[in-house]
Image (cartoon, grey):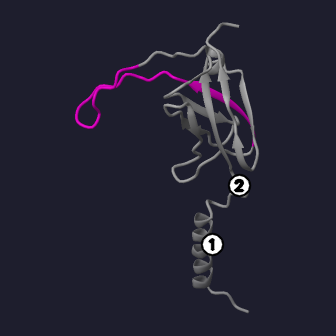
Amino acid sequence: MQINRQSVVVLFVAGSFSLLATGCGSSYSLGTVTGTVTLDGKPLPQATVTFSRGQGRMSVGTTDEDGRYQLQYSARQKGAEPGSHKVRIATQIEAVSGEGDLAAVQGRKELLPPRYNDKTELTAEVKPGRNTIDFDLTSAAK
C-alpha cells in the first residue's frame, strides 16, 4: 500500500479535529461539586470558593444568598478534577471604578480569617460523580 503526502495531511487534520472535539484528549471525568458555606451558622453570600490540586486547572464557584455554590471547571464544564484539593474561601472584593459597563463597584474587606484563604487549612476530596461538600466556618480565632 502506498501512502501519499495528501493522505498524511488529511489524516493529521482529521486527528487534530477529533482531539479538539473530545477536549484535547482528556482521559478523566470531572466530579460535580456543590455545597453550602456558612459563617458562624449563617449562610455566607458572595464568597469565592476555589478548589486547587496544586497542578492543572482550578475550579471556582461563588456562593449565592443562601451560601450555596457550584464549582465551574471551565466556561462549559461544571465540576473539579478528582483527587485531593486545597480549598480557599474568600469574601474580599476589589474596588473597581470606570466608565460605561465598568460602573464603580465598592470594595469589601475580607470577612474571613486567613486560615480559610491566604493561609488555608481547608481541604476536600473530590470523587468522580456527584459531590456535596459543605464548609461550616467560624469567625473566632483559633
Classify residue 17 by image quadrant. Answer: bottom right
- Residue 52: mark: none
Q: Residue at x 57, y 37 (%)?
A: 69
> Label 2, on which residue?
29
Left or right side of 29 for 21: left
- Which is more toward the observer, 123 or 55? 123
Residue beneath the point at 69% across and 46% down: 81
In magenta, the rendered stretch is 83-107
Amino acid type shown at disc 2: Ser
Q: Nearer the viewer, residue 37 or 74?
A: 37
- Residue 134 appears left or right of 106: right
- The three-letter amino acid code for the residue at tag 1 is Gly
Q: According to the image, label 1 marks what residue?
A: 15
Looking at the rendered structure, the secondary structure element under dot 2 is: loop
Residue found at the very far bottom of the displayed protein: 1
Mark nearer the N terminus (2 vs 1): 1
Q: Quadrant of residue 82?
A: top right
Picture coordinates of residue 18 (x, y %)?
61, 70
Crowd tier of the residue under label 2, counting other residues whose Cα lies within 10 Å: few below 14, some 14–19, many 20 or above: few
